[in-house]
Amino acid sequence: MRNLTLLTDLYQLTMMYGYSKSEQKDKIAVFDVFYRGVGNNYAVACGLEQVIDYINELKFNEEDIEYLRSLKLFDEEFLGMLEEFRFTGDMYSVKEGTIVFPQEPILTVKARLFEAQLIETAILCILNHQTLIATKTSKIINNAKGEAVAEFGLRRAQGPDAGIYGARAAMIAGCSSTSNVLCGQMFDVPVSGTHSHSWVMSFCDEVTAFRAYADMYPDKCLLLVDTYDTLKSGVPNAIKVFGELRAKGYEPLGIRLDSGDLAYLSKEARRMLDEAGFENAKIFASGDIDELILRSLHNQGARIDCWGIGTKLITSDGCPSLGGVYKLAGIEENGVIVPRLKKSDTPEKITNPGLKKIVRFYDKKTNKALADIIALKDEDFSSLTSLEIFHPVYTWKKTLLTNFYIEELMIDIFKGGKQVYESPKVMDIAKYHKEKIGEIWGEYKRDVNPQIYKVDLSDRLYELKKELLTKNTF
């Protein structure tokens, strides 16, 4: 376990130093993590396990203290406080794999201002990255239409951590396997892979390379057929080797296409395999694929059974940042948490005050999600039989919800600095995510012009926000 205590922005430490010199240090503060929605109409919450690990390991060691001393920004009294630093607050969060929407609190910290300020940067770093990759993967999986997707973006990831934890996030969001062996070891997830073009090129000819691979893995033989010419040599040579395997009592897994016109090549390859009697051989495709290319290939009738997706998944091509933020929502005054609100000329940057929760409403007939309410933490919706909510964006439109049941999405993670929630295994989180994504209507998951999911504020939170907006100071 690495010590990530200094994984923070310098201004977090200078603010902590300022708090230590004032009466602010021990005041209890409430901070929310949420995203504003640029590029993502929904997101898959991911990274909580790594946040938990970070909080549990949060401790300034001697080398950290000595480095901070060398900056000549802090006095010895403050450095002494850091030597004793531990997280003693509360943390609430949605479970990993949960579907969340813009402005909803993904994670909330309630702790001394001195503590809550330090952990902002690392929490955002962890949650922003994994949630971004999980969300991109979710869109890819949605367009795969039930076909298996293998993640293999490690070589294109922006560093080892991005490769490892990006693969973790991809597995949670629905990938069937990863090429990343270290991720497989760390998180007990399935790994997959066959051979590259260099394997084929290293032999005197293609068919010899195929035979050598088939000899090593007779019951797991999947051959890459586009090194020289897919239809003239690759597929015919694969069929020849498959016939030799069958004569020995084995059946091949199939072939992989990695370049060219995947729609045309897959249809021709399927025809050739079927005519040769290998109707059960799978066609695996890779090569700079994303959700939009997947949709296009399906529209063209491509005959592809499994997908390998790397670069555009692991880098979240088209949406490089989630845009998650960590904003103060309340601070203690005379022993009471007083709500705080950030004003802005940009409406989506106006924050929601107070200690909050998310309440999701489900249709009893379909078990599909109807809408979410962001509410104050002490509000009780259990006795409601109907609720009128505003549509987001078009606030003059209303919807009356009836015949529903509810679920509160946020759970306790830390209480008084003690961990009270145990993260499930990655593949169990993936099962949970599959259930949660299935509760969201397809119209909300479209790539183009998705319907906007309804997220409203409770009446109490709305009135509180309106009151604070009319004040000149807070």
Image (spheres, grey):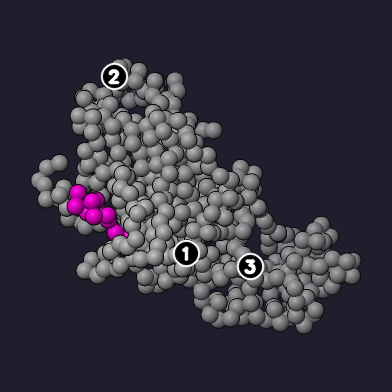
Q: Nearer the viewer, mark 1 or mark 3?
A: 1
Q: Is residue 51 visible?
A: yes
Q: Quadrant of the C terminus?
A: top left
At label 3, which amino acid type do we have?
Answer: Cys
Q: CA distance from mark 1 to mark 3?
A: 30 Å
For label 3, the crowd category at 10 Å Cα-Cα, with few meaning under 14, some 14 to 19 and many 20 or more, is some
Numbered badge on residue 48: none
Q: Would you place residue 31 above or below residue 150 in this image? A: above
Does residue 412 appear left or right of residue 157 in this picture? Answer: left
Q: CA distance from mark 1 to mark 2?
A: 58 Å
The residue tagged 2 is 75
Looking at the image, do the residues carrying marks 2 and 3 touch, with CB atoms under 8 Å apart? no
Locate residue 269: give its quadrant: bottom right
Residue at the spot x=75%, y=66% of the render? 253
Looking at the image, do the residues carrying marks 1 and 3 touch, with CB atoms under 8 Å apart? no
Q: Nearer the viewer, mark 2 or mark 3?
A: 3
* Of the image marks 1 and 2, the number of the one nearer the N terminus: 2
Residue at the spot x=24%, y=36% of the render? 337
Numbered badge on residue 367: 1
Q: Range of the magenta residues?
A: 453-464
Q: Would you place residue 39 above or below residue 45 in this image? A: below
Secondary structure found at label 1: loop
The residue tagged 3 is 306
* Of the image marks 1 and 3, the number of the one nearer the N terminus: 3
